[in-house]
Amino acid sequence: MPAHYTRLQWKNSQPYSEQYDDVFFSRAGGEAESQHVFIAANRLAQRFAGRQHFCIAETGFGSGLNFLLAVQCFLEHADTGASLDFVSVEKHLLHPDDVAQCHADRPHLKTIVDELLRCYPPAAPGMHRCLLFDGRIRLTLMHDDASHALGAVDMQVDAWFLDGFAPSKNQAMWSQPVFDAMARCSHAQTTVSTYTVAGVVRRGLQQAGFEVQKVPGFGDKREMLTGRYNGGRRRARQAPWFQLPRASGDCKQVVIVGAGIAGLTTAHQLAQRGCQITLVDCAAEAASAASGNPAAIVMPRLTVGDEVYNAFALQAFYFARQQYRKLQQSSQQPFWFESGVSTAVERERAEKMLDAAHMASAFLRLDFQYATKTERLWLRAEDAGWIRPSLACQQILAVCADSTRYVQAEVASVRAENHRHILLDSEERVIAEADCVVLANAHGLNALLGEQQYPVAANRGQVSLVEERDLLWRLPAPLSADRYITPALEGVACVGASYVDSQAASLSKSDHADNIDGVNSLFDRAIVSESAKQRLEGRVSFRAVTPDRLPMVGPAPDISDFKQRYRDLHHGKAEQNYAPARYRQGLYLNAGYGSHGFSQAFLCAEILASMIANTPAPVARPVLERLLPARFLVRELKRNRPRTDSVSPDRCQ
Ligand SMILES: Cc1cc2nc3c(=O)[nH]c(=O)nc-3n(C[C@H](O)[C@H](O)[C@H](O)COP(=O)(O)OP(=O)(O)OC[C@H]3O[C@@H](n4cnc5c(N)ncnc54)[C@H](O)[C@@H]3O)c2cc1C
Ligand SMILES: C[S@@+](CC[C@H](N)C(=O)[O-])C[C@H]1O[C@@H](n2cnc3c(N)ncnc32)[C@H](O)[C@@H]1O
């Protein structure tokens, strides 16, 4: 998959693809054709009215014209509280300048084009979620081949737009795997339309379970196809233990425990979906624990040879950047800095990372600015940056203040009663209750869950604050290796961070020394003066770490039932011999961010909000399964060995 944007070609003043030898729109008028073939044929104006949520999926995003017109129609006809998911797949993602040029002569669409360009995806392949109009419109753009991308998603689509280049020139786009994936994501009211009546398309759709008919086409095209799904319910082939309960989608009161970046982003994404939030934290103010450090680097951690992990890390990073940009625009105080980050990586690993083409061109390149005396190469993550966490957290809370009530209380347990979850304090007094509860309280999670324990441990980290006068270099951007240093802001630079398996909450002199020695060992020349060690301030907090260094995001499984139901999983019996898993209805987890909360929490919050609202997930199924809290149980049952990893202590901070 290309890791770059595709530049648009023009022929007779029409957007044109040399590779497919076809035009993007009809010569008779692209916009009128789109209106006829997609918007009118799917009766969108009528169907939007009165619906709280609608989902359109498209093959071939191209310049986004169909998307713009669908949004225009939605804004005109849907209720103000309703939201639209538009999921589209595009193998050759156009450069944003070309998208702008394509629509330059459409002033009536300018507001929507501007919103699209504001959150337009990076060139990196994979899935990207873009939020327009304060999240009312969710565009999920899959920069991928259609059959591959659609094979990996699970969603309920109301209307399909099929808009590949002509089937005779673009067979991959009109293949049976694409039609079958469409069927899997359709229901009895799902419609489809396309400009072509080619036999391969008609037969393919019929074979997948669509009833199709020819209707008058646009311009010089005599006919086009419309259709409806009539093939019965099909489920994705998912392992029974990962078949998640489908939420009703109408849960509008949500209680969240924990007001760090995990809880705040969850509140933010749910508030965008019209939920009222009760945010419970034992501290008087949000971001008082790990999320309150003076500075944090925002950069995806990329690994060698784990495509799914990298897809998640990159997607999460870019989604976070989109949200921080938006939040920064609404704040007077600077907290988000897109400076790039230079990172020293062991040579062999760095070379492998650069070899993985999509990372090299889309995200990482060799950084010739820095040479190092160690066996490491410097890589520059051009798009990365750094953040002032507590200011960012305050701003998140400020923008969803109207829908969020903050309650200071320490939750001691969660009790389930008649499909409701009741949060109790240590004296069994009720703090809050709701049908839907999200536990986003980091390593404090297990303390609330009695026997249902998860492998999340607390890990101590200390940052050291260095006065600007003690910096021997002026740093334009953070440097990162085993330790990191951020540029000075308001006279102070942040050096971090120690990583220790300890519960000690007080500042440690030796951690300070390790931090400073760590950054000074990056180069022949020290960055921080030795004398700084005498006057360092700092801060200690605790990361919540899981064994596979990924957060836990999703519904809480019923652990005892899981262990009983899948007790012989290690025998390797086929998946179809097992019944679907039982989950604790309405109880969700969002914790375990280790050292990457500020890059990962926004996307995970969007995943959770999509689950709760029963709308399409922003990530592909393989990514989702790597994040589900039940994954540890499944691994344990497959191995037939209990976990050996430590469980976090019962502590609030
Ligand atoms: C030293 C250090 C440096 C770091 N550097 C970076 C970095 O550069 N970049 C990056 O992305 N990440 C970094 N991280 C990681 C990042 O800070 C975390 O991943 C992130 O803050 C986790 O957010 P959270 O909301 O899950 O947890 P927290 O911010 O810890 O929030 C959990 C909240 O739950 C509350 N709580 C707990 N139990 C209860 C209870 N029983 N009742 C009520 N409330 C409860 C706590 O009071 C707390 O407010 C660093 C972490 C450390 C420790
Ligand atoms: C006719 S154009 C789409 C026009 C578009 N809907 C619009 O509104 O501008 C067809 C698009 O399909 C894309 N495409 C072609 N083959 C593909 C494939 N196998 N998977 C995904 N996209 C593909 C092309 O790059 C092109 O952008």
Image: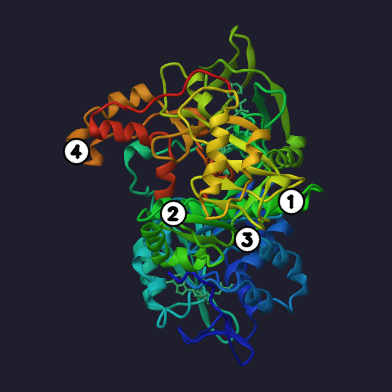
How packed is label 2: few (under 14 Cα within 10 Å), some, or many (20 or more)? some
Disc 2 target residue: 310
Disc 4 target residue: 573
Disc 3 target residue: 44
Measure the C-alpha gap from mark 3 to mark 4: 46 Å
Which residue ends up furthest to the top in the rendered image? Answer: 427
At numbered mark 2, what does the secondary structure look like: helix, strand or loop? helix
How packed is label 1: few (under 14 Cα within 10 Å), some, or many (20 or more)? some
How packed is label 3: few (under 14 Cα within 10 Å), some, or many (20 or more)? many
Measure the C-alpha gap from mark 3 to mark 2: 37 Å
The type of residue carrying mark 3 is Leu
Identify the image quadrant of the N terminus: bottom left
Disc 1 target residue: 328
Measure the C-alpha gap from mark 4 to mark 1: 52 Å
Please state the horizontal and vertical placement of residue 560, each as a whole percent of the image: 35, 21
Please state the horizontal and vertical placement of residue 404, each as a whole percent of the image: 72, 32
